[in-house]
Amino acid sequence: MTVELNELIKAAMDARGKAYARYSNHPVGAAILADDGNIYAGCNVENAAYPLGFCAEANAIGNMVMGQGKAIRHIVIAGPGEHLCTPCGGCRQQIREFAGKAGAPVTIVDRTGAVLFETTSADLLPHSFGPENLSSEGKDHE
């Protein structure tokens, strides 16, 4: 593992420790290495009215945008168990928005930080819809 990946894993696990998951008891943390070289983390935040919660990945993306990062270079997701905790469909679309059509590495770790799965955002959301699909000329805006 590179130091960079170790730092991302630690940031995701630290974020998971701050999750507000009182309803599901399923704390999740995410950490993004952005194009500006900074690491941005987020955790899931639940609400008694379930649709009003936030996923860890979306929170990390929001923190990246607030920090003026523009693109995801790598994202790590830390779940609470030994099972895969991959991004939900909505988060896959949000990751795609900031990782671009070509995608970015996605690493899933378990509760101890052990790598369970490595893939790309493009593989998690094949044939995705992105900014270039909104162009009337079909040009790629990445």
Image (cartoon, rainbow, N blue to C red):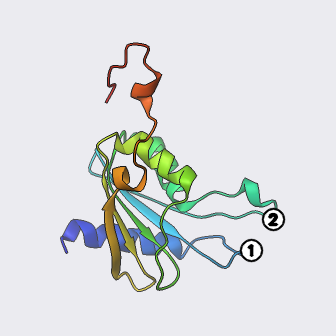
Q: Residue at x 34, y 39 (%)?
A: 101
Considering depth in this image, is 57 or 127 the residue closer to the camera?
127
| Tally of marks | 2
Q: Position of residue 110 (x, y in %)?
A: 43, 81
| Quadrant location of the N terminus in the rendered image | bottom left
Mark 2 residue crowding within 10 angstroms, few (<14) / some (14–19) / many (20+):
few
Report the residue at 31% width, 68% height from top.
118
Q: Quadrant of residue 18?
A: bottom right
Task: Give above or below for 50 relative to 16.
Answer: above
Q: Tell me the amino acid under the disc marked 2.
A: Ala
Tell me whether circle 1 and circle 2 mark residues in contact (CB < 8 Å). Answer: yes
Return the disc, 1 or 2, that comes first in the chain's sequence.
1
Which type of secondary structure does the marked residue at label 1 adopt? loop
Would you name the residue on which mark 1 appears?
23
Secondary element at image label 2: loop
Residue 141's x, y, as percent? 34, 25
Name the residue beneath numbered marker 2.
48
Q: Is residue 111 above or below residue 102?
A: below
Q: Quick one: label 1, few (<14), some, or many (20+) residues within 10 Å? A: few
The residue at 58%/74% (across/down) is 27
Instruction: Point out which mark residue 11 bears.
Output: none
Q: Position of residue 5 (x, y in %)?
A: 26, 68
Q: Which amino acid type is marked by label 1?
A: Tyr
The residue depicted at 52 percent of the width and 53 percent of the height is 91
The furthest residue to the right:
49
